[in-house]
């Protein structure tokens, strides 16, 4: 699976979510409480253990589920890069709330002994992300294995199937609830696509992501050279920048059009962070 450039650049919320999920899974696993994390009819409707509802959103009940789930969440960071951290945080919140509601309704309706406790973990967010993955991520290559036609997206689907059936019905139900939540988001239920968080709630994570990129950026990048030239030669403050092919390729891997990426880099003076913001703002209009 390849979700574009490596790391969590321009994906601070995905990084935070994966980190929180891994820490809670390990801590609760060490305490021997991971097997009791999943939602159950008794604890939700009789004992009213609301904290279990919150814990079950983040912590997986086993290490294999954590590995597959984290890999999928890491791949799906491409959506945060495409629509921006603000809108993606709304998608995360919507997917979690709606899928959790469907899980509670499923427990109330089915009441089967085999479904006394659902599998825990961010199944809602993961399988809600398969909806934009199916519709918005194009197939870039196809190949055949033992006569079976596959694409570069097939391995992501296989990882999702492994997670979906990891605990049979216990994991199948929350996975399907996530698919329903993603479908409702896709249908723009209640105009959810236009909802945004206040910028001051999301800027902190964005600054962390951008500052880490700036620290790791080599000193001889086109942006740095251009700024040194500008400082040393005041008369050259409005040069025409040739967009970096590496930055163009990075923006294209995020899902932007090549020509639009070049124009944004020219306007941003080869600063990829500013160029990304320009493209995201244009996409949101």
Image (cartoon, rainbow, N blue to C red):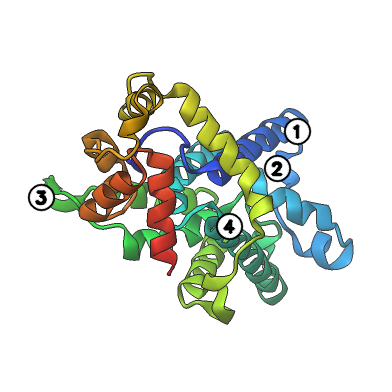
Residue in front for this viewpoint, 237 or 214: 237
Residue 255 vs 1, above or below: the answer is below
Element carrying mark 3: loop
Q: Earlier in the sequence, mark 3 or mark 4?
A: 4
In the rendered structure, are the residues bearing label 2 and label 1 in contact, judged by CB atoms less than 8 Å apart?
A: yes
Residue at figure coordinates x 33%, y 29% from the top left: 226
Distance of label 2 from label 3 (alpha carbons): 41 Å
Q: Which of marks 2 and 3 is nearer the N terminus?
A: 2
Distance of label 3 from label 4 (alpha carbons): 38 Å
Q: In which quarter of the image is residue 115?
A: bottom right
Element carrying mark 4: helix
Residue annotated with mark 4: 92
Q: Is residue 72 left or right of residue 267?
A: right
Q: How crowded is mark 1: few (under 14 residues within 10 Å), some or many (20 or more)?
A: few
Q: Is residue 260 left or right of residue 185?
A: left
Residue at figure coordinates x 21%, y 36% from the top left: 245
Q: Residue furthest bottom?
A: 190
In the rendered structure, are the residues bearing label 1 and label 3 in contact, judged by CB atoms less than 8 Å apart?
A: no
Q: In this view, does 178 lie to the left or right of 133?
A: right
Residue annotated with mark 3: 147
Q: Earlier in the sequence, mark 4 or mark 1?
A: 1
The label shown at residue 32 is 1
Q: Residues within 10 Å of mark 4 (few under 14, many from 20)?
A: many
Element carrying mark 1: loop
Distance of label 2 from label 4 (alpha carbons): 25 Å
Q: In which quarter of the image is residue 139?
A: bottom left
Residue at figure coordinates x 43%, y 41% from the top left: 273
Residue annotated with mark 2: 35
Question: Quadrant location of the C terminus?
Answer: bottom left
């Amino acid at each position: 699976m390849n979700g574009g450039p490596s790391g969590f650049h321009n994906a601070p919320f995905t990084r935070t979510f994966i980190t929180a999920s891994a820490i809670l899974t390990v801590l609760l696993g060490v305490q021997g409480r991971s097997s009791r994390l999943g939602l159950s009819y008794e604890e939700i409707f009789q004992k009213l253990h609301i904290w279990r509802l919150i814990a079950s959103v983040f912590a997986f009940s086993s290490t294999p589920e954590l590995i597959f789930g984290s890999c999928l969440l890491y791949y799906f960071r491409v959506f945060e890069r495409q629509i921006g951290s603000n809108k993606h945080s709304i998608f995360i919140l919507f997917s979690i709330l709606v899928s959790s509601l469907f899980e509670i309704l499923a427990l109330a309706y089915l009441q089967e002994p085999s479904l006394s406790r659902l599998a825990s973990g961010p199944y809602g967010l993961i399988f809600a992300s398969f909806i934009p993955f199916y519709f918005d991520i194009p197939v870039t290559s196809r190949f055949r294995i033992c006569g079976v036609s596959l694409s570069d997206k097939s391995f992501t689907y296989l990882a999702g199937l492994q997670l979906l059936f990891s605990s049979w019905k216990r994991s199948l139900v929350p996975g399907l609830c996530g698919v329903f939540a993603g479908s409702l988001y896709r249908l723009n239920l209640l105009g959810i696509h236009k909802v945004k968080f206040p910028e001051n709630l999301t800027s902190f994570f964005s600054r962390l992501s951008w500052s880490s990129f700036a620290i790791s950026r080599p000193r001889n990048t086109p942006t740095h050279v251009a700024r040194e030239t500008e400082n040393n030669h005041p008369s050259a403050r409005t040069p025409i920048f040739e967009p970096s092919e590496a930055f163009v390729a990075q923006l294209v891997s995020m899902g932007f059009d090549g020509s639009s990426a070049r124009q944004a880099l020219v306007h941003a003076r080869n600063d990829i962070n500013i160029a990304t913001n320009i493209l995201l703002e244009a996409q949101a209009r």
